[in-house]
Image (tube, grey):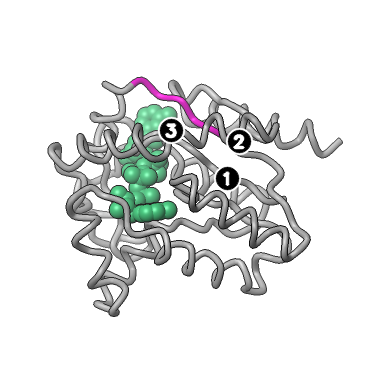
Amino acid sequence: MNLILLGPPGAGKGTQAKMLIKRYGIPQISTGDILRAAVKEQTPMGVKAKAFMDAGALVPDEVVVGIVEERLQQQDCRGGYILDGFPRTVAQADSLSRTLQKNESDIDHVLALTVRSEELLSRITGRRTCRSCGAGYHLLFDPPKSPETCTECGGELYQRDDDREETIRRRLDVYQEQTAPLISYYAERNLLKTVDGMGEMAVIQANLVQIIESSRG
Ligand code: AP5
């Protein structure tokens, strides 16, 4: 089962992907997480990507396409995967489609989360992530027991560099300009399922699972 989670920054793609991987035992491929790890390790790719990410811009297509092509070849993707944050441009979607065709594979569903724009800003500014295990929280909507410590593993919680208000606004504009066209792109290919991303995380998860299960017969 190969899935794409689509939606603007803060829509809950990462949150829902983490719940889905527990249920289905397939990996989450988050280009954002892979890029942040490269930035942290200061690899040549990370150094190049950092300037784009800090500015709220997209990292060039050829960089992310290369990352995903390599990742999809790994053993743990054989039983399926969840793409979170990729593709993000029509060029990336075309490239993914060519790669899948070559491998005689396909995407089963593109699950698009819709969230009102005023909610996106408050979701992102309140987000905190664990440096050790990567668990995600929200200071108001999904609070850790202590605001600076991961409830799961005791690691330090941090705020992403690109989660400052000015950068968030830029990321939301970039989404509208470059990523939103993928909604019609995948609708035309009969792959798009739109899911209301407002409300309780567990209810959104149940709606996603219902779509996935209904097509598995
Ligand atoms: P990336 O890391 O992919 O960020 P994003 O797409 O901007 O998405 P976010 O991670 O901000 O949001 P999300 O939808 O995962 O929300 P989350 O579940 O965390 O990309 C970062 C950067 O990397 C890009 O700007 C770009 O520079 C680069 N990049 C990455 N991929 C690229 C690509 N393909 N091409 C080019 N460049 C690329 O939820 C947000 C918060 O809300 C959390 O605190 C959560 O607890 C809370 N929350 C979640 N659901 C709910 C709910 N139902 N109710 C209340 N709160 C909720």
Q: Nearer the viewer, mark 1 or mark 2?
A: 2
Question: Could you give the CA–CA distance between mark 1 and mark 2, rounded to whole angstroms?
Answer: 10 Å
Crowding at mark 2 (Cα within 10 Å: few <14, some 14-19, many 20+): some
Q: Which residues are magenta?
A: 111-116
Closer-to-camera residue (43/94)? 94
Residue highlighted by disc 3: 180
Residue 64 visible at all: yes
Q: Residue furthest right?
A: 217
Residue at numbered disc 1: 4
Residue holding disc 2: 186
- Is most of the magenta stretch helix, strand or loop? strand
- The image quarter containing residue 155 is bottom left
Report if the beta carbon of the residue with label 2 is closer than 8 angstroms to ligand 1. no
Give SS at disc 2. helix
**Amino acid type, callout 1:** Ile
Residue 28 in percent (x, y) is at 54, 56
Q: Residue at x 22, y 52 (%)?
A: 160
Q: Position of residue 19 (x, y in %)?
A: 54, 45
**Please, what is the three-letter code of the amino acid marked with disc 2?**
Tyr
